[in-house]
Amino acid sequence: MAAALTHDVLEQARRGEPEALTLIYQSLAGQVTGYLTARGVEDPDGTAQEVFLTVFSRLAEVTGGVDGLRRFTFSVAHARMVDATRARARAPYVVEYDAGADPRLEPSPQDALLDQLESSHLSGVLDSIASEQRECILLRVVAGMSVDETAEILGKTAGAVKQLQRRGLLAMRRSLEEAGEHA
């Protein structure tokens, strides 16, 4: 492909003729992209586009004919590769947060309760507490409602909901402890 490049094509490109610019791009883009790929640039196609934007904007500075154009193009490609490598080295390594792998976390009381809700034993414990307490705990813990939302649903004040939840959890705890002693 590079054989299609001539001194006349280079002169036409310097005058901004689109066909000549296209011919230069088609002749060199594959090699530039291959070079950038081999050098480990994350986005070789995008970086190659940047290379040609620079080359086309500075065609007047190119000396040495077609060989000079090739040298200039690859010197720009090399500079972009160095820039990309430096930018990657400066960028922080981003890792997705995995709460399951974080040893600092302990299960919340809500998580523990939800895990236990899956067992039929806990369902019996829920049945053993007062119906208002059970409803409050189910709305707060299982449904994830806020204190105010739960208060609105139950027709109570926020303070009353907090007390119902506290008393219900304590009653459940006593019931679970008693069941553990009898097991």
Image (tube, rainbow, N blue to C red):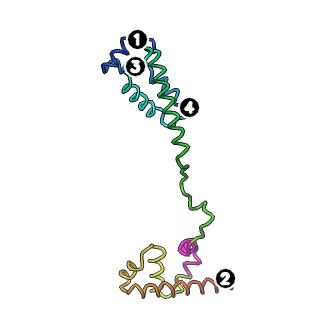
Does residue 101 sit above or below 3 in this rendering? below
Viewer-side residue, 115 vs 58: 58
User: Which residue lies at the image location 40% right of the left edge and 19% below the top edge?
Assistant: 24
Residue 114 is one of the magenta-drawn residues: yes
Q: The residue under label 4 is which amino acid type? A: Arg
User: Secondary structure under badge 2?
Assistant: helix
Q: Earlier in the sequence, mark 3 or mark 2?
A: 3
Crowd class of label 1 (few under 14; some 14 to 19; many from 20; radius 10 Å): some
Q: The residue under label 3 is which amino acid type? A: Ile
| Quarter of image, res 118 | bottom right
Estimate the x, y position of residue 77 in percent, counting from the top left: 48, 28
Disc number lying in front (2 or 4): 4
| Quarter of image, res 62 | top left
Give the number of the disc on residue 39.
4
Disc number lying in front (3 or 2): 3
Disc number lying in front (2 or 1): 1
Q: Which residues are magenta?
A: 108-124
Q: CA distance from mark 3 to mark 1?
A: 10 Å
Give the number of the disc on residue 24.
3
Q: Earlier in the sequence, mark 2 or mark 4?
A: 4
User: Taking the image as drawn, is residue 118 in sight?
Assistant: no
Which residue, given by chain and number where applicable, does mark 2 sit on? 180
Give the number of the disc on residue 6.
1
Q: CA distance from mark 3 to mark 2?
A: 81 Å
Marks 4,1: beta carbons within 8 A: no
Q: The residue under label 2 is which amino acid type? A: Gly
Q: Earlier in the sequence, mark 4 or mark 1?
A: 1
